Amino acid sequence: MDSKILNTMDYHKILQSLAHHAATPLGEQAALALQPSTNLDEVKRRLQATDEAMTVERLKGGAPFSGVKDIRGSIKRARINAMLSASELWDISSLLLSGRRVARHIAGVHEDNPVPSIHELAQSISDQKALEEDIRRCIDEQGEVLDQASSELATVRRELRIGETRIREKLESMIRSQSAQKMLQDQLVTIRNDRYVIPVKQEYRGHYGGIVHDQSSSGATLFIEPEAIVAMNNKLRETKLREEREIERILSRLTEEVGLLADVLLYDTDCVEQLDFIFAKARLAHQMKASFPRMNDRGFIKLKKGRHPLIPIEQVVPIDVELGNSYTSIIVTGPNTGGKTVSLKTMGLLSLMAMSGMFIPAEDGSQMCVFDAIYADIGDEQSIEQNLSTFSSHLTNIIRILSHMTPKSLVLLDELGAGTDPAEGSALAIAILEHIHKLGCRMVATTHYSELKAYAYERKGIINASMEFDVQTLSPTYRLLIGVPGRSNAFAIAERLGLSKSIIEHARGEVTEEDLRVETMIASLEENRLGAEAEREAAERLRRETEAMREALAEERAKLEADRDKRVARAEDEARAIVAKARREAEEIISELRQLALEGAQVKDHRLTEARRRLDEAAPASKIAAKTKKSVKAVRQIEAGDEVMVYSLNQKGSVVELAGQEAVVQLGILKMKVRLDDLELLSSSKSEAKQVQSGTNVKRTRGENVRSELDLRGANLEEAMMEVDRFLDEALLGNLGQVHIIHGKGTGILRTGIQEFLRRHKHVKSFRLGNYGEGGTGVTVAELK
């Protein structure tokens, strides 16, 4: 892409903003070197990577690039065995650590939200953890070699510390003596030329002997290394030389490790640079509130609320532009300061940004084209002087554009034909526009010449446009209006400013009839546009209201369906609970029957199996269904022998006999009294001619009236248990709530056995000894469930 075009479009300012969002010097360099691509696939890959980086930023925050520096120079030096400094090695370890962290950061997002492009790039970073840990074991963050780098270095530094301590102790003992106070300028120990010295007054220089290393600016103080510590300083110096040699050995070893991995580390550096650059594009897009543009290579542009990225978002006026479908050229007319040049630059700069893989500040659904080149002739038309040199400069630039453009180029021309005679300028502008249009370029041109309005109106594939102007406020609105040519508004402005009506009318008379027709046509178009826009806004408002109502209805429907599902689930749970309860009761009944059979009652197994099958098939109905059945069932007098349904037990049975408002019902092997309103007639004994069958072979003797007392005095314990069991069954069938068992006082064996039996009996709610007047301890009173 021509660098002049990039400068004209202020593309370098976008790159500076992009570099500002980079986290490392590597990313800054990549941002400042970014160039638009003319390859559609490459542009799509760039945009996809930016979109993936935005996904990572949104879900997991920014990638950890902290501490990364450009280490490529250091790596190249290590390759030729030039020893690296400790700080350079630390920077290498920082890049290795950041690369590993960034790869892990991206992988964490990729598992649930695939980001294939940047994940592949991050995974290509090699894992050099061993080298990283080796460097960090030997060097700290300040670039100092640590004692633990080697055992030799630790020993040498220990000797250094001991030697320094001894020298200081020796010197401090010298300066603290009574005689030394008058000979010393200050009572302190200092260092000159890496050797410990003391400040001695000039007149006492011979007292300490030794070596003079320095003197004060006035010459009154000499910094002397006393003869008593010269040997100690010499030994300390030798130890420091040993330290330096050991540090050099450690740095050489680490440098050699880096040199062996030079190619790998250079590739890792490039990967980190690219990742930081991609995340910088994502952060810039977030700041600009930019969107992902759909790209094509067929010359189609559709900007929806496109904003110039260098104008503050609260000040910029968005534009809507479509180019390359119904028309390939746009001619924008209108007065100066209306925003024509900004609109041109917006289209050009957003095209460059999209071709560079950056999101554009426009609404979702915007489309941009990958052009083979973008050409522009945009100059400052605010100057008062319009001379031949200005015209020549513009024309020279246009000639260069005409010689290089292709059908796949975008051409932007500002104030075409300006700077010369209006008649010649407009004719030349029409000729240039016709040549570009025939070639098939995508073109946007701005002009002052009204002749170009008619040209655009007559030519297929070219459309007029203008910048909206508010006559009431005498100021531009900076809105680009496609399909409406610009009006001069000179008469309206003059009238608003108070110019005499006679002068204005005279001026109108000087305008040709053809120009008046054009102005009238433009006014009519603008009036129609305003009406259509008002109708569109009303339709849009109705659409939004309809959408809101539809969303509300959908939400309400979802709530109703969710409530219905909850009710159904609750009903199913209740039904399962009822069935489970019925099964438990059935199992208890069957268990009782088997127990009776074991005790001697002749209950056959096939009868028990039949009873169980009937209980399984008798799925309990809901109360509502039962009530409905009961209400709709034809009422008929129940007679002995009829087959009935007992509501309270949800069991079928046969009526044995009637007793007032109750009936004795045979339920399997059991007989029990049931109220008539708890029965539903299933079939008549007369219609079905059924023979009532006895329900059991177990024979029991009982009187007409159920007894409430059982006298067991004189019976043994085994006989008493059998009688109590039978007595409780009869009392339960007789709906008795309380019974008395007389066992006498005696030895208490009978009383204890009976009470133990009652404690285990499932139909006994509680029991107690008789009160005064009930027999006392000779009677046990039991309450039944």
Image (cartoon, rainbow, N blue to C red):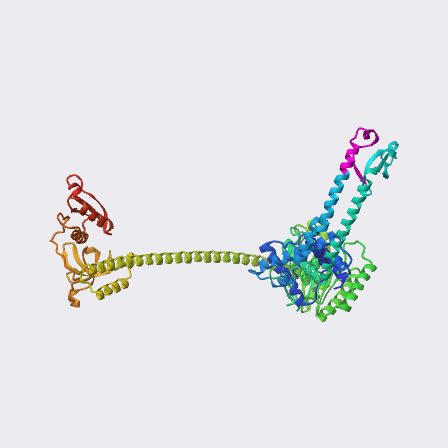
Figure label count: 0
Query: Could you say where residue 159 lies in the image, as x and y percent from the top left?
Result: 74, 45
Residue 512 visible? The answer is no
Q: Nearer the viewer, residue 71 or 321?
A: 71
Q: Nearer the viewer, residue 615 or 58?
A: 615
Query: Could you say where residue 299 lies in the image, as x and y percent from the top left?
Result: 67, 67
Q: Nearer the viewer, residue 448 or 414?
A: 414
Quadrant occupied by the N terminus: bottom right
Against 755, is 643 above or below? below
Residue at the bottom extreme?
A: 438
Query: Could you say where residue 783 lies in the image, as x and y percent from the top left?
Result: 21, 47
Query: Could you say where residue 639 lies in the image, as x and y percent from the top left?
Result: 15, 60
Residue at the left extreme?
A: 703
Residue at image position (61%, 55%) is 57
Question: What's drawn in magenta, residue-wise?
Answer: 168-191
| Left or right, residue 617 beside residue 700 | right
* 472 falls in the magenta region: no
* 171 falls in the magenta region: yes
Q: Nearer the viewer, residue 776 or 119?
A: 776
| Left or right, residue 559 beside residue 168 | left
Residue 591 visible? The answer is yes
